[in-house]
Amino acid sequence: MNELRDLTTGRVDAVASAQTSTEERKAFGGPLGATAMMVLLPLLTVYLWACVHLRGGALAVPDAELLAKLPLPTAKSVLWTVGWLGFQLALDLYLPGRAYTGFPQRDGRRLVYRLNGLLSLVVTLLVLGGLVLAGLVHGSAVLEQLGSLLVTAILFAYLLSAFLYVYGRRYRPEGPGNEPEVRLVMQADGSAAASVSSAVSADKLVYDYFMGTALNPRVGRLDLKMFFESKIGMTTWMVLTLLMAHADYESDGKISLGMGLVCLFQLLYVVDFYWFEEAMLSTWDINNENYGFMLAFGFVVWMPFTFSLQSQYLVYNVPDLSVLAAVGLSLLNVAGYYVFRTANLQKHRFKSDPGAKIWGRAPEFIQTRRGTKLLASGWWGLARHANYFGDLTMALAWCLACGVSHIVPFFYFLYFTPLLIDRERRDDQHCARKYGDDWTAYSKRVPHRIVPFLY
Ligand code: NDP
């Protein structure tokens, strides 16, 4: 039943929340943009698969011949997907882990996390290596099933998002960011009133399905967002990359220089991710972004299948890389890694210990009226998101390791750049709302957004 609350009785907080939700509801183009993304992004991943696997990495015209070859799920792909999810789930739940208390989330709560990602990755790679050596797993067999595995993952992402939507609506915790929908309605006497509604419009259903209805859903001791982001997104990406290297080896008895570099660069990224696993607890995804289709699709489909595009491409192509070029790419990757890692660590350590030195000096910061501090020295004094700059530099190195004859292996860098530009702007708006004038002062002091001295 709709509950009418008169604006003049001081329910300003409800209306403010309504305005915030309305603003947030505009992200990604609102319900229309969300619908388009839910249709187009899965199609894009299938298209990229087709370019690499049916056209050797060239951009493909989606003609009848191509459409006839598009993959469908197979019994094998479904079985492998279920087995893989079960294996990763067992490692997540039963391997020993360290307990960490997370940072205050958007709704003010602090959750305790059990982290065992590095051990889980090591066990996964040892088991995989053992199965490959025993001749029970072949990269070429996975390569052959990759299209079906991709479509199976897409269908699974839709199902997972439906579960997350229902979960969020049933167990939606109260607090900022989880307010019921509030609309302004005209009353008979002409005055405005705020209407708090529990009804679900089609627009809201679609948008909530896309953006999510719960922040950090948990089933028993399984944290669904952490599990799918790390164990499924990151580990599956790494395993697919290594299996593509094995497929390369099976095809001509050796691994190309480009493939070797891509494997090493990406292994560094994934091992680093798990080494500093607790740094994830202070990220925007964990503390601010609801868990819906956008993240579910990102973790289950986008990360494993598009982050491994370079290694998929390199099974069919051998770029002409000189040793000098390989050294240059390695330096580029290490430089990007250095910026990415040290920037993220500076913020993480500053939040845990605001007195810890940065680049040998006491940290400079802006004391906010909320009681927290904004770091304004180190990388955070050169750009407001230099960590994104490091990430983009690494992305460029991975793509360049594929040579420059096709654009498809550059997809990662080409989509990642606008994604991080948009993400920085969304985070900027979020921080401006959260910190008000203190954020304005920080932005004046650190005018560059991502690239120190440039942008
Ligand atoms: P950040 O780790 O940069 O976190 C942003 C948050 O940090 C803000 O919301 C704010 O949160 C806090 N913050 C911002 N400025 C300051 C400051 N000066 N001092 C103290 N706290 C500050 O963002 P992300 O979670 O987006 O990125 C984390 C890493 O993950 C990055 O390295 C990024 O490159 C990477 N990434 C990778 C992706 C991929 O697809 N490979 C996708 C997205 C990110 P609060 O107000 O709560 O403190």
Image: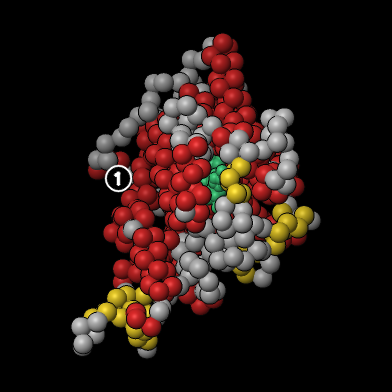
Q: What residue sits 35% from the left and 42% below the top? A: 47
Q: Nearer the viewer, residue 200 or 87?
A: 200
Asked whether residue 37 appears in the rendered view, the answer is yes
Q: Residues within 10 Å of mark 1 (few under 14, many from 20)?
A: few
Quarter placement of the N terminus: bottom left
| SS at badge 1 | helix
Image position of 417 (left or right of 67): right
Q: Is residue 387 left or right of residue 419?
A: right
Residue 390: x and y in percent read 54, 32
* Residue located 40% across and 79% down the image: 10
Q: Which residue is mark 1?
A: 67
Q: Height in image: 254 above or below 225?
A: above
Q: For residue 265, which quarter of the picture?
A: top right
Residue 448: give x, y in percent of width and height: 46, 34
The residue shown at (59%, 65%) is: 108
Task: Compare residues 198 and 81 and report the one nearer the observer.
Answer: 198
Q: Is residue 325 above or below residue 416?
A: above
Is residue 377 positioned above or below 440 on the image? above
Q: Nearer the viewer, residue 440 or 331?
A: 440
Q: Which quadrant, please, contains the C terminus?
A: top left
